[in-house]
Structure formats: C-alpha cells, structure tokens
Amino acid sequence: MKKILSTIAMGTLLSASLYADITKVEIGAGAWAQTPSGTANYDKGLGVTGTNTFDETKDTSPYVWMLIKHPIPFLPNIRLEYVSIHATGKASGSWNGLVAPVNTNSVMDIKEYDIIPYYNVLDNTFWTTVDLGLDIKVMNLDYKVEPNGAFTGYEDTYTAPIPLVYARVRVEIPGTNIGVESDGKYITTGSSTIYDARIKVDYTFDISPVVQPALEIGYRTQKIKIDENNLDVKTDMNFSGFFAGLMLRF
C-alpha cells in the first residue's frame, strides 16, 4: 500500500510539474523612463564627419516581452523582448559636405529586438530560478540631423545583430506574491562593450488559476560603446532609468 501511495504521489507531482512546464507563458508590457547620455561619432568620408551629443532629456520608451517555457529538456526555452528608444541631441561637424550650424538638433530612434534562447539551471528550487542563455540583440538605429537654415540636414539608418551572454536570477519571497529578479546581457571585445541590465520587483495577484495578472517595477541601464577601427560609426551611449509595467502569467 505504501508503494502504491508513493507511486501515485510521485505520478501526481510529475504530472503537475509537466503541466506547469507546458503552460509556462508570461507576457509583459510597460514604459521605461530612460535618460540618454553620451555621444555618437560619424566618420564615413564623403563629407560626413560629425558628432552627436545627447541632450540628457528624459524620454518614456515603450517595451514588451514574452517568455515561453516547454518540457523538452534538450531544446532551449525562449524569451522575446522589444524596446523603442527615442533620444534628442545636438549635431556638430560636417554632414553631406555641409557644416552644421551651432545648436543644430538631432534625433536618434533605436529599436531593439532581443531573441533569447535559454536553459533553466535552477527552476524555482528553494524559491530560486536561474537561467543562462544567449541573446541575439538586433538593433535598428535611425539617425537624423534636422535642417537648420541653409543646412539641409542628414539621415542614416543602421541595422546590426549583436550576440550577448544572458543570465537571469529570480527569487520568490516565501509566503508572499512578491518576486525579486535581475537579468543582464553582456559582451566585450577589444575596446567595445555592450550591456543591458535590469533589476525589478513584481507582485502577482492570485485571483485566477488560469491567468494571473501582475505588476512590475524596476531599474534598467544600457551601455552601447562601439569603438572598432573598421566601422564608420563609433558610439559611447548610455540609457538608464526606472520602468514599470503590467504582466500576465499563464
């Protein structure tokens, strides 16, 4: 009888665990109140040798993310992210062979698409989750130097995939619906360094066994320093600030 009860108990736990893995989906969306700082230097020849300096004016950027976890042990889970960054600044130097007047405005829009395959090293073991993986961050950068008098302006677009190491740690506080989480993406090579790090606290409303809404609030910081001799654009940009959003757990 003890063996039968033990087998039933083990089967129940295994089924519950498998069901939880199959249905593990989380989505979130919110706003990031980031403040840009730093510079971007252009040296493309053909009359394009200029510098952009950010105004350090706070801007609210939208973000969304989704996490999907499955029960197949050899295949990685997947996390998808998107954020749109808008930053204003001042341009100086030569653009299309024309020198930008003093106080010429510039606008930089960056769209980031993160594709993150990852594995669970710990899966809520003693209330702790640890994920490790690889982030393919696809950055689409639109840059515009606005016209100013006889100066006709300048526009350019860049798209580049960047591989980064990904790590995430989450701790559920026992006896509460509160979770504390931190994640980071990082790569450094030569004189270039790129990282994207966050820390947050979230609260889950346990009102439904199927869909559980939650709130998240935290702080995010990015650094994009690109300094390679074979590139015509060199950057040393920082974006930092608090974010807040809504989540759904399935």
Image: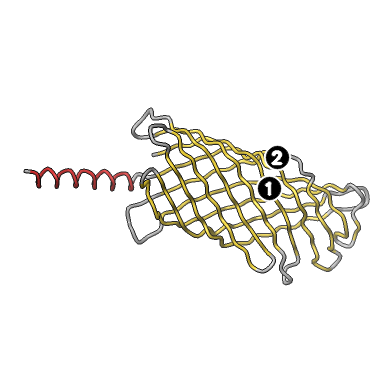
Q: Nearer the viewer, residue 149 or 219?
A: 219
Which class describes the residues within 10 Å of circle 1: few (<14), some (14-19), or many (20+)?
many
Q: Nearer the viewer, residue 224 or 64?
A: 224
Q: Is residue 172 left or right of residue 28?
A: left
- Which residue lies at the image location 33% right of the left edge and 56% below the top edge? 72
Q: Amino acid at mark 2?
A: Asp
In the image, residue 235 lies at what x, y percent?
73, 59
In the image, residue 53 lies at what x, y percent?
80, 51
- Which residue lies at the image location 70% right of the left edge and 39% below the top edge? 59
Q: Is residue 156 left or right of residue 152?
A: left
Q: Of callouts 1 and 2, which one flags the residue occurring earlier in the amino acid sequence?
A: 2
Helix, strand or loop under label 1: strand
Task: Name the residue carrying label 1.
Answer: 239
The N terminus sits in image quarter? top left
Helix, strand or loop under label 2: strand
- Which residue lies at the image location 65% right of the left edge and 61% below the top edge? 193
Q: Amino acid at mark 1?
A: Phe
In the image, residue 4 lies at what x, y percent?
9, 45
Which of the 4 image quadrants contains residue 48? bottom right
Q: Nearer the viewer, mark 1 or mark 2?
A: 1
Q: Is residue 193 above or below residue 80?
A: below
In the image, residue 250 lies at what x, y percent?
38, 39
Task: Name the residue carrying label 2.
Answer: 59
- The Cα atoms of the two marked residues, 1 and 2, are separated by 10 Å
Which class describes the residues within 10 Å of circle 2: few (<14), some (14-19), or many (20+)?
some
Q: Is residue 97 left or right of residue 226?
A: right
**Farthest residue, direction top:** 207
**Farthest residue, direction bottom:** 230
Which of the 4 image quadrants contains residue 244? top right
